Image (cartoon, grey):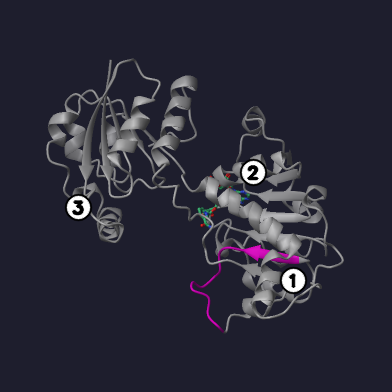
């Protein structure tokens, strides 16, 4: 028998968390006790609660009535962004694992989790949408989908584009990924399915693990990715090392027929070098979901480029990512129960 407590909220229902909990690979029967945390608020009203908990942590908000009593028996706790406070954790002598169906952990008292050696597992729920969008931008950039649309909406019927000399089928191109984390790996999975050759540079990933996951990717040095790839796609986080990492000297290695895609963060790309490469047609084109100033200003030189597709930081926005996140959590937890390890386990 297993005892699971779930706490739903206005964005992720306790019913969905309960269904996911019932599908966990735990000793049967699984007894699930449901609680709600401000589940009756509108999404807009709930945003205010999210802000409080993200800024002030779990102690800054109320916990659900009756939760402390339920925690006495809880072995597993599943939440989205409901608070997991010190008081709750201290009331739970049997608690083995907390699963949270989001990436951020501001709603959890990590100090007490660490002190009590409770396992904590999370999910990166918008990785799939961002990976989809990245491949979408590869199509958009190489085949002028956005550039044509913009002109047609303005009454034109364009047949010529700056990349006319280079237009080719995606499966004939080689994609180079810089950064092979959650999103980068999902991009590889999609490109493998499309029969596109993939190379990657990521000095920190375990190559054997990537191979064991069945991903077909050739690891190359950073400069070689820039020299050889037809499409370069950026998937690093912003760190002191990656800030402005994609600079003049790297961009100058790119082929005139190549494209740059950025769905990660603007600060990893040195803006003046990027603009100059597009303006001087040193590369065939680019597509980006992230810009240096949001919303983009009318005077931004990016808006003058005829070989650039820009979207409004929407790569991660799908309506299903949040409500369906408990099922992703179920899969991650079950994988952990099967293998005894998971990249999604938080090391505190
Ligand atoms: N456009 C959007 O709406 C959107 C949504 C979600 C995430 N993102 C962004 O996507 C990016 C990737 O997210 P993720 O969840 O895959 O991150 P992640 O942390 O899982 O992966 C980042 C990878 O970059 C690698 N890396 C670190 N330094 C590097 C370097 N110098 N060179 C090459 N690789 C390096 C790391 O080893 C890691 O594998 C982040 O910048 C994130 O902010 C964008």
- Say above or below: 85 vs 48: above
Point out the stretch of residues depicted in magenta: 285-298
- Which residue is identified by label 1? 277
- Which residue is identified by label 2? 203
Report the residue at 74% width, 50% height from top: 175
Q: How far separated are the C-alphas under marks 3 and 2?
A: 39 Å
State the image quarter where residue 260 is shown.
bottom right
Q: How far separated are the C-alphas under marks 3 and 1?
A: 48 Å
* Residue 317 image point, x, y percent: 48, 56
Q: Nearer the viewer, mark 2 or mark 1?
A: 1
Is-magenta flag for residue 106? Answer: no
* Residue 223 image point, x, y percent: 76, 53
User: What label does residue 60 carry, if any?
Assistant: 3
Callout 3 touching callout 2 (CB < 8 Å): no
Q: Is mark 1 within 8 Å of ligand 1?
A: no
**Closer-to-camera residue (342/194):** 194
Q: Earlier in the sequence, mark 3 or mark 2?
A: 3
Q: Earlier in the sequence, mark 2 or mark 1?
A: 2
**Closer-to-camera residue (116/344):** 344
Q: Is mark 2 within 8 Å of ligand 1?
A: yes
Q: Residues within 10 Å of mark 1 (few under 14, many from 20)?
A: many
Q: Secondary structure at mark 3?
A: helix
Q: Residues within 10 Å of mark 3 (few under 14, many from 20)?
A: some
Callout 3 touching callout 1 (CB < 8 Å): no
Q: How many marks?
A: 3
Q: Secondary structure at mark 2?
A: loop
């Amino acid at each position: 028998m297993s005892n699971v407590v779930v706490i739903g909220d206005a964005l992720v229902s306790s019913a969905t968390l309960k269904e996911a909990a019932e599908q966990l690979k735990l000793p049967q029967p699984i007894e699930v006790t449901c609680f709600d945390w401000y589940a009756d608020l509108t999404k807009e009203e709930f945003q205010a609660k999210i802000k409080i908990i993200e800024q002030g942590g779990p102690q800054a908000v109320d916990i659900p009535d009756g939760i402390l009593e339920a925690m006495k028996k809880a072995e597993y706790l599943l939440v989205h962004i409901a608070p997991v406070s010190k008081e709750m954790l201290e009331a739970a002598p049997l608690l083995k694992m907390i699963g949270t169906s989001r990436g951020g952990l501001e709603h959890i008292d990590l100090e007490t989790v660490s002190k009590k050696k409770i396992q904590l597992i999370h999910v990166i729920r918008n990785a799939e949408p961002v990976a989809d969008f990245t491949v979408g931008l590869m199509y958009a950039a190489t085949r002028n989908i956005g550039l044509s649309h913009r002109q047609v909406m303005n009454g034109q019927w364009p047949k010529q584009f700056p990349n006319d000399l280079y237009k080719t089928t995606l499966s004939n191109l080689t994609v180079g990924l810089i950064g092979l984390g959650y999103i980068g790996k999902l991009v590889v999975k999609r490109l493998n399915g499309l029969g596109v050759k993939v190379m990657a540079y990521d000095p920190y990933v375990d190559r054997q693990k990537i191979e064991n996951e069945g991903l077909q990717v050739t690891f190359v040095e950073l400069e070689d990715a820039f020299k050889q790839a037809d499409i370069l796609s950026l998937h690093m986080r912003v760190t002191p090392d990656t800030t402005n990492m994609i600079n003049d000297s790297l961009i100058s290695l790119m082929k005139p027929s190549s494209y740059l895609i950025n769905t990660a963060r603007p600060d990893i790309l040195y803006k003046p070098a990027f603009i100059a490469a597009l303006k001087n047609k040193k590369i065939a084109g680019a597509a980006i979901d992230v810009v240096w100033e949001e919303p983009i200003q009318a005077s931004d030189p990016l808006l003058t480029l005829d070989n650039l597709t820009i979207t409004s930081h929407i790569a991660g926005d799908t309506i299903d990512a949040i409500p369906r996140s408990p099922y992703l959590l179920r899969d991650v937890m079950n994988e952990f129960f099967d293998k005894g390890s998971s990249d999604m386990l938080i090391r505190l």
